[in-house]
Image (tube, rainbow, N blue to C red):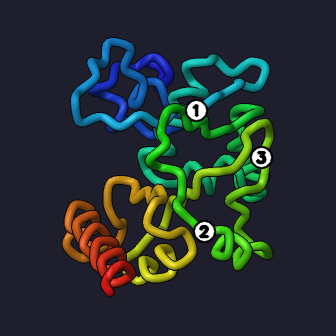
Amino acid sequence: MSPQTETKASVGFKAGVKDYKLTYYTPDYEVKDTDILAAFRVTPQPGVPPEEAGAAVAAESSTGSVTNMFTSIVGNVFGFKAFELYVWRICEFPLLIPKLSKARLTAFSRGIFFTQDWVSMPGVLPVASGGIHVWHMPALTEIFGDDSVLQFGGGTLGHPWGNAPGAVANRVALEACVQARNED
C-alpha cells in the first residue's frame, strides 16, 4: 500500500513522505468551545490539491514552524513553498491589536513595523512563532508589548521534562514578564 493512500492509524509507522491531509486534515472535525480561530488565505500552487495546502498550514502552524518554513528563503530553497500566497487574516479581533502609543511605535521605526501596510492589510498583528523559549520572554514582551500572539507550537521542544512542561514554563515566564511590565 502506498504511503499516500494509507489510513491515519498506520501513517506514523511507515517511512517516506506522506500527504499532510493524512494526519492533519479532519473533514468531520467538530468545533469545541476552547478552540481558537486562526484564519489563513491559502492559494495552492498549480497541481497542489487545496486540502493539501490547507493541511500543510495546519500542520506547520501546530508545530510553531509555519512562519519559518513558508516565508523564509530557506523554506523556498528546500521546496517547501506549497502555495503562492500566505496571509494572516485577522478578522473581528479588536482586542488583539497591539496597544502601543505613537511614541512607542516611533521607537520601532527601524525594525518591526506594526503600522506598515502588508499586501492589502493595513497594519500587522505582531506574531512570534517557532523556537520560543523562556529566556526569550523579556525581549518578546519588550518588542511586542502585552497584546501579541506568541505561538509555542504545543510546548517548548527540548525541555528536559517534555513538551507540556515546556509550554507551562513558557506561560509562567510570559505571565511574569507581563506582570513585571505593568507593576507600578
Classify residue 82 as left or right of residue 151: right
Residue drawn at 76 percent across, 26 percent down: 45
Residue 152 x/y as whole percent = 39, 59
- When the figure is inspected, residue 91 is found, relative to residue 133, above or below; the finding is above
- Residue 154, given in percent of the width and then of the height, sits at 33, 54
Q: Give the residue drawn at x 67%, y 75%.
A: 103
3D distance between C-alphas at marks 2 and 3: 20 Å
Q: Which class describes the residues within 10 Å of circle 1: few (<14), some (14-19), or many (20+)?
A: some
Q: Which of disc 3 and disc 1 is earlier in sequence?
A: 1
Could you tell which of marks 2 and 3 lies nearer the N-terminus? Answer: 2
Q: Which amino acid does label 3 sit on?
A: Trp
Is label 1 in a helix, a strand or a loop?
strand
**Residue wearing tag 2:** 101
Q: Nearer the viewer, residue 22 or 170?
A: 170
Q: Are marks 1 and 3 in contact (CB under 8 Å)?
A: no
Please tell me whether mark 1 or mark 3 is closer to you in this view: 3
Question: Is 147 situated left or right of 144 in this image?
Answer: left
- Residue topped by disc 1: 40
| Distance from the alpha carbon under mark 1 to that under mark 3 | 15 Å
In the rendered structure, which amino acid carries the disc numbered 2? Ser
Which one is in front, 8 or 175? 175
Q: Where is residue 123 in the image (x, y as percent from the top left)?
A: 70, 49
Q: Report the front residue among 37 and 58.
A: 37
Three-letter amino acid code at disc 1?
Answer: Phe
State which quadrant residue 28 falls in: top left
Label 3 sits on residue: 118
Q: Which mark is residue 92?
A: none
